[in-house]
Image (spheres, helix red, strand yellow):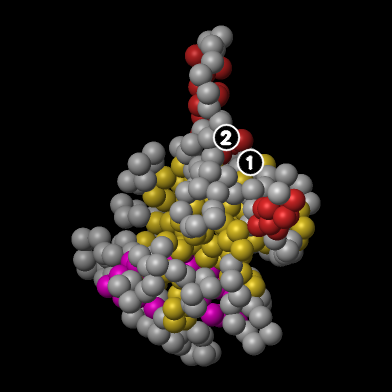
């Protein structure tokens, strides 16, 4: 019995240190039914995230400055197509995202999901028109969730028939001029199941992503972490434990190494039948955090 307990503890205490409990990013954002993903600048003075309708039919990217969560603004290039999963480059001059907007400006019919970017000269400048990353990265498949290392290598999710499962994690090497064709990460990361929403560290030393309904998981989607061995190969991924993961879906991780803060999306729920004094109290309860809809959470964690 003691051995079984030790094994269980080992499963849920990976090699990182927590600084505090998991909390909701901001109650100001409870006015949005679904907030799907999140990224923030190194000094945390600028953040981007996706807001969606309850059934995710509408999907737009918004921006906030200086943690003023109560007043987000829609990005100007967002239109009648879907925009999601923003990732801000380290210098703040490029914003990558996924969209099903037409590949050509003359078309009006939505495309498959590709990875796009917009660019600017500085924080006060306007963003450019969206630019498609091109056929070296994008394909007839859906590409999602771009994230970049400091050397320019691009990691993303692709729904490809050539992968190990339905959704897998790929990366494209940046050679200083262009990207290589997508490379499938090894089977310590991918499997015949679902792997998606990968965040790569700036030095490519670790990767955090979601595995869906994985054997030994806590339920639905869990966040996993993998680090590289001495040969630069990815080691077996570890579940990030029950301080982060629940029986509900956890996904869309983003880690700020400057502040040692992990941000992620969760659909955790904590609603139970009760008597309410009035409608206001009822609405506060069902629109608050842990109501089963996507919310952004954060915790201090040193990786």
Q: Is residue 146 magenta?
A: yes
Q: Tell which residue pokes out farthest to the top in this image.
A: 277
User: Mark 1 near mark 2, Cβ–Cβ under 8 Å?
Assistant: yes
Seen in the image, is 31 located left or right of residue 122? left
Viewer-proximal residue among 28 and 215: 215
Magenta segment includes 153: yes
Label 2 sits on a secondary structure element that is loop
Residue nearer the viewer, 169 or 71: 169
Magenta region, residue range: 137-159
> Residue 3, position in %: x, y?
72, 55
> Can you tell which mark lies on residue 24?
1
Q: Which mark is residue 268?
A: none
Mark 1 neighbour density, 10 Å: few (under 14) some (14–19) many (20 or more): some
Answer with left or right where residue 125 lies relative to residue 110. Answer: right
- Left or right: where 129 falls relative to 200: left
- Find the distance from the CA under tag 1 to the CA under tag 2: 7 Å
- The correct choice, above or below, for 271 with respect to 273 in the image is below
| Residue at horizontal 50 percent and vertical 48 percent from the top | 219
């Amino acid at each position: 019995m003691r051995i079984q307990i030790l094994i269980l503890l080992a499963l849920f205490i990976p090699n990182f240190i927590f600084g505090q409990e998991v909390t909701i990013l901001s109650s100001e954002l409870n006015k949005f039914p679904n907030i799907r993903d999140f990224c923030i600048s190194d000094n945390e003075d600028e953040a981007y995230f996706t807001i969606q309708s309850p059934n995710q039919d509408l999907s737009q990217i918004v921006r906030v400055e200086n943690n003023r969560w109560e007043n987000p603004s829609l990005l100007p290039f967002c239109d009648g197509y879907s925009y999601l999963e923003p990732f801000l480059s380290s210098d703040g001059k490029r914003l990558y995202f996924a969209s099903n907007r037409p590949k050509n400006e003359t078309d009006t019919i939505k495309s498959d999901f590709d990875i796009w970017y917009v660019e600017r000269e500085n924080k006060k400048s306007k963003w450019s028109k969206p630019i498609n990353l091109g056929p070296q990265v994008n394909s007839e498949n859906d590409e999602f969730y771009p994230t970049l290392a400091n050397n320019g290598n691009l990691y993303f999710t692709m729904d490809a028939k050539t992968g190990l499962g339905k959704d897998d994690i790929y990366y494209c090497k940046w050679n200083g001029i262009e990207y290589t064709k997508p490379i499938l990460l090894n089977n310590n990361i991918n499997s015949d199941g679902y792997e998606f929403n990968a965040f790569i560290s700036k030095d490519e030393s670790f990767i955090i992503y979601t595995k869906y309904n994985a054997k030994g998981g806590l339920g639905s989607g869990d966040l996993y972490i993998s680090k590289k061995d001495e040969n630069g190969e990815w080691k077996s991924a570890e579940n990030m434990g029950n301080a982060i993961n629940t029986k509900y879906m956890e996904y869309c991780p983003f880690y700020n190494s400057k502040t040692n803060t992990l941000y992620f999306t969760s659909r955790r729920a904590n609603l139970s039948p009760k008597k309410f004094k009035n409608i206001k109290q009822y609405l506060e309860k069902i629109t608050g955090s842990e109501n089963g809809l996507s919310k952004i959470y954060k915790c201090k964690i040193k990786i």
